[in-house]
Amino acid sequence: MCNAPAACAASMIVVIMGVSGSGKTVVGSQLAKQLEWKFYDADDYHPIENKEKMSRGTPLTDQDRQPWLCELHEIIMREKALGQHVVLSCSALKRAYRIILLTGATSLLPEKLHKKDDLSSETLFVHLHGSVEVLSQRLQERKGHFMPIMLLDSQIATLEPPSVPERFITIDVDKDISLIVSAIQNEVARKMMLVESAQTH
């Protein structure tokens, strides 16, 4: 839980989300570098059991993902307590998963979004969207990652694209990385202005 309200109120979180192969890590790391923000790759925090399961081509369940998502929420809250802006690359496939990231809820019930530690007004989800053909090609070219191409279909089936009232933008991955990062930067600047304006009224 955040112990520094003023710092927390000023901190922004950008979650780069999407299925495997959408370029979350590349986009997220470059965005963080441009903004000079902290960057976290959610893949680094999967327990070994999850990685082994995925490497065998077995999709993760909600129960597999929940402790992982809760840990990511704790990281977000820790950085916000320090007044840090954060870019997180995370698949965040379901709305329930995004609620856990925002609230740390131990239940996957949508009403948990209204908990007092809701970060939605200070969080932007960036959904990297691409065709199956583009995503498949990227996964075929990727080396040394635990996520096999055979899990792409299950990820697409699991995906619940963000929708109102979530704060989000959707960007086609079939663009130059610099254009994608620039578009996100513009939206982040706009969102930060809105948050700052709301805090002064």
Image: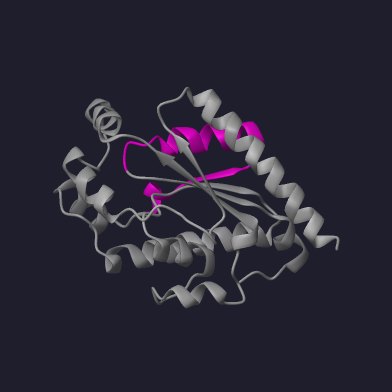
Instruction: Tell me where residue 124 appears, x and y as whole percent.
Output: 57, 51
- Residue at 48 percent of width and 56 percent of height: 163
Residue 195: which quarter of the image? bottom right
Instruction: Tell me where residue 82 appears, x and y as whole percent.
Output: 69, 58
* Coloring scheme used: one colour
Instruction: Please tell me whether residue 121 is drawn above or below residue 129 in the rendered image.
Output: below
Asked if residue 115 lies in the magenta stretch, the reply is no
Of 42 and 162, nearer the camera is: 162
* Start-end of magenta stretch: 20-45
Residue 187: which quarter of the image? top right
Q: Main secondary structure of the magenta part?
A: helix
In the rendered structure, the answer to whether residue 162 lies left or right of residue 133 reads right
In the rendered structure, the answer to whether residue 31 lies left or right of residue 105 reads right
Q: Residue furthest right?
A: 200
Residue 68: which quarter of the image? bottom left
Q: Is residue 36 visible?
A: no
Instruction: Tell me where residue 6 appears, x and y as whole percent.
Output: 78, 64
